[in-house]
Image: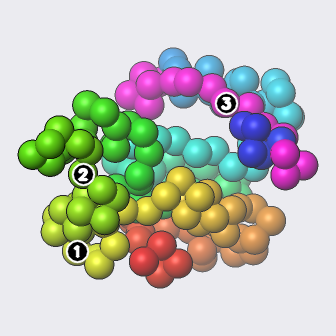
Amino acid sequence: MSLIEQAGGAGIAVEADVRDPADMVRVVDAAITDSGRIDILVANAGIVSTSRLWELEVAAEGITVNVVAPTTVRTPMVVNEQTVERDANGEPLSDEILGKRFAAHHPIPRPWVYPEDVAREVVHWSPSRATSPARSSNRPRQSARMH
C-alpha cells in the first residue's frame, strides 16, 4: 500500500481466503465502506477458477472481470533462505543460475516476472483504461509486456 500512497493513490488491503465466500463478502464490504465502490480488486492465487463465475454474475452491472495470470512472480515467498538451492560451499545460488533453472520449467524465455510487472498489467486493465466490456476476459493471459 505504501507504493500506492507514494504515487498519490489510495486503497485498502484486506487479507482473505478466496475459498471462503464469507471472506469474499467481507472484502467487498470493506472496500465499499472505505471508498463507496471498487475500481480494482486484486486477488492472489486461486481466483482464476472462480473468475468465470464472477464475470457472469456482475456483467449485467457493467463490471468486467480480467484475470492476469503470469508465470512465477519473484517474491520472497518464491526465493528465500528456505527455497534457494546452495552451491558446494553452502552459498546461495546466484539469480542468474536460479533464473536459468526456473526458465527451464516455463514456456516463455523469462524465468519469472516481478511484482511491478504484474502491477503494470493490473493498471492497464483498470477501469480508467478499459473502455469496453469486450476487453474483459475469463481466460488467464500472459501479457506480451511481461515477456
Drawn side of residue 143 relative to residue 126, left or right: left
Residue furthest front in the image:
89
Drawn side of residue 51 relative to residue 96, left or right: right
Residue at image location 53% in from the left, 53% down from the top: 115
C-alpha span from label 3 to label 1? 32 Å
Q: Going from the N terminus, do you reach mark 3 or mark 1 first?
A: 3
Q: Amino acid at mark 2?
A: Leu
Drawn side of residue 113 relative to residue 82, left or right: right
What number is the disc on residue 107?
Answer: 1
- Contact between marks 3 and 1 (CB within 8 A): the answer is no
* Mark 3, residue position: 13
Viewer-nearest of labels 2 and 3?
2
Q: Amino acid at mark 1?
A: Pro
Q: Amino acid at mark 3?
A: Ala
The image's colouring method is rainbow
Viewer-nearest of labels 1 and 2?
2
Q: Position of residue 130 (x, y in %)?
A: 71, 70
> In which quadrant of the rendered view does residue 122 lie?
bottom right
Task: Give the magenta-colored segment's residue range.
Answer: 6-21
Residue at image location 31% in from the left, 33% down from the top: 81
In this rendered view, identify the residue nearer to me: 108 or 37.
108
* Mark 2, residue position: 93
Q: Position of residue 12 (x, y in %)?
A: 74, 31
**Image vertical order of residue 6 relative to residue 59, above or below:** above
Drawn side of residue 46 relative to residue 1, left or right: left
Tag 1, which secondary structure?
loop
Q: Going from the N terminus, do you reach mark 1 or mark 2 first?
A: 2
Tag 3, which secondary structure?
loop
C-alpha span from label 2 to label 3? 33 Å
